[in-house]
Each structure stands twice: as C-alpha cells, then as structure tokens.
C-alpha cells in the first residue's frame, strides 16, 4: 500500500437530521407528547417503518404484531426508539459507502443479542445494551465513506488480530474504527456508558480491570457485547467484520465477571443460535 496513505485523513461526523433533533426536543419535554412524536415520525417513511419493524422483532417479546406507531412506541420505549432513529439516520448519511447491508444486518443482530444477554446478567442498562450493539462498529462505514482505500485495506487484513488491525489503521490512516465510532457516539449524544464501551473494545481484557468494581455498568455492557459478538460470529462466518474481537479476547474472564459458567454459556449460546436459524 502506498506510503502516501500514511497521512491523516480528515473526516466529518454527519450532522443529526432535523427530524431527529425534533424528536430529541420532544423527549426532553417535561410532559412527553406521544401524539406529536408520532406526527413527526409519520413525515419520514423510512423512520416510521424502522420503528414498526423493530417493535415486531422477537427481541421485544410481543405476543402479537404491532401495526400502529403508538403501539410500537409503547412496546420498545422512547430510549430504544431514539437509538433506532439515530442509527437509521446515520446509515442514511453514508451514501457513498457500498455493500453495507450485511454490516447493518449484523449490527441489528448483535444489538438484539447484546440486549438479550444483558437480561441474563443484569436487569439494568437494557436500553444501553441495545444501543451499544447497534453502535459498536459504526466507525467502519464512516471510514469507508471517508477513505477511498479503506475497503481494499479491510479486504486485505486479518481482522481476527485486533491489535494488528488497529495499529495498521492508525499507521496508515491516522485513526482507527473504534476511535471513529467513539467520536460518532459522542457527537450523536449516545449514553456515556455506550460511548465508553465502544472505545474499550480496543483494550485487552486483562487491562479492563475486571477485578475491581469501577465502571461496573460499562464493563457489564462490554461483556454482554463480547458474548453477543461471539454468538453472531458463529452464525455469520462469512461476514468478517462481525467476529474481529473473539480471536483476540478470550471469554473466560468475561464469563467469570458476569457470573456465568462455561457450561451455562454454551447452553445459552446454543439457544440463541437456534433462534437465529429460525425463518424470519
């Protein structure tokens, strides 16, 4: 690869669209006006459809199909709705990057898995778990959008070696995809726990401080994400970006931290794999 690439490439985090800004303002109000939120969402067919589709996924545990936006909002909650809108708006902003459908499918899959696993290890932070799953690799499409050579780069590197991958990104492009994802998360005002967990993906497990009680919520989120990525990587062997973490980080310390035995985890993983294999 050309030495000319060893220059920092400027990139601009996409601005939040006006419809998203309006929704955030409505959610910040003392009395949330659901009807007004619905009216705003109805003006954007893609956002409207995304909220309905998400509400009807198995991850949200509904017993019947949701057909109205009001019902969808009640089922998934405002926090997850906001995450869906952020991610779809971000996805739409990457107009130049191609061949990303599998990427976004995997992000949705990992989000649902992360939330489901979080339910097993803690009753807290479920909305943050979904957000983290969706956002955990969002720096990759940003780099594809910004850097013409990035697709060629990622096709030619072993993404199973995370340190090698990140070092190469830093050396060649002056940035790495976890750093970019962290900056996107901050700019789009994602929860701070989510933002911190995104950047911690680049840290060796032995350096996470799992033996102390600091930043417990961030660590629980990250552990749930790593287990979710493990399940997803088994299911999607052909999508290389989906399994980059597991060749680098062993799951034993993760399981010990969340209090799940290896046997229980394997059983849990098989259950999730069976669900993924069911016809959509």
Image (cartoon, rainbow, N blue to C red):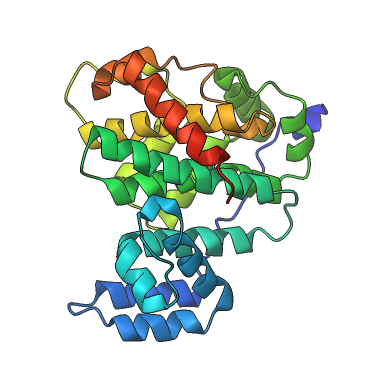
Instruction: Inspect this view and state whether residue 99 appears.
Output: yes
For residue 248, above or below residue 40: above
Q: Is residue 237 left or right of residue 262?
A: right
The x and y percentages for residue 19 are 47, 77
Q: Nearer the viewer, residue 267 or 203?
A: 267
Say which quarter of the image contains residue 163: top right
Q: Is residue 174 above or below residue 248?
A: below
Q: Is residue 201 visible?
A: no
Percent of width and height locating residue 153: 75, 31
Quadrant position of the N terminus in the picture: top right
User: Going 45% across and 45% down the picture, which residue do you hit?
Assistant: 111
Residue at the right extreme?
Answer: 2
Which residue lies at the image location 67% right of the left edge and 51% below the top edge? 101
Depth check, front residue: 41 or 138: 41
Image quadrant in which you'd find residue 211: top left
- Horizontal placement of 79 versus 244: left or right? left
Kindly identify the residue that appears in the image at 28 percent across and 32 percent down.
220
- Point out residue 273 in the picture as x, y percentages from the top left corner: 50, 32
Q: Is residue 209 left or right of residue 170?
A: left
Residue shown at 41% from the left, 76% from the top: 69
Q: Disc count in the image?
A: 0
**Residue 271 or 31: which is nearer the viewer?**
271
């Amino acid at each position: 690869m050309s030495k000319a690439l060893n220059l920092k490439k400027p990139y601009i985090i996409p601005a939040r669209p006006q419809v998203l800004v309006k929704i955030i303002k409505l959610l910040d109000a003392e009395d949330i006006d659901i009807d007004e939120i619905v009216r705003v969402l109805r003006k954007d067919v893609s956002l409207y459809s995304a909220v309905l589709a998400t509400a009807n996924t198995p991850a949200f545990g509904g017993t019947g199909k949701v057909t109205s936006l009001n019902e969808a909002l009640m089922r998934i909650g405002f926090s997850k709705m906001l995450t869906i809108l952020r991610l779809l708006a971000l996805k739409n902003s990457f107009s130049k990057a191609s061949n990303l459908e599998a990427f976004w499918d995997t992000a949705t899959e990992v989000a649902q898995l992360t939330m489901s696993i979080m339910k097993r290890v803690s009753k807290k932070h479920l909305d943050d778990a979904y957000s983290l799953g969706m956002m955990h690799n969002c720096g990759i499409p940003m780099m594809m959008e910004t850097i013409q050579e990035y697709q060629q780069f990622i096709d030619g590197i072993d993404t199973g070696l995370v340190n090698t991958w990140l070092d190469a990104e830093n050396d060649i492009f002056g940035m790495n995809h976890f750093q970019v994802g962290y900056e996107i998360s901050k700019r789009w005002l994602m929860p701070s726990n989510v933002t911190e967990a995104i950047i911690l993906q680049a840290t060796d497990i032995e350096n996470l401080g799992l033996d102390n009680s600091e930043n417990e919520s961030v660590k629980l989120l990250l552990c749930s994400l790593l287990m979710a990525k493990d399940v997803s990587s088994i299911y999607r062997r052909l999508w290389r970006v989906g399994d980059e973490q597991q060749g680098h980080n062993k799951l034993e310390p993760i399981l010990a931290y969340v209090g799940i035995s290896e046997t229980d985890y394997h059983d849990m993983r098989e259950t999730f794999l069976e669900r993924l294999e069911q016809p959509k």
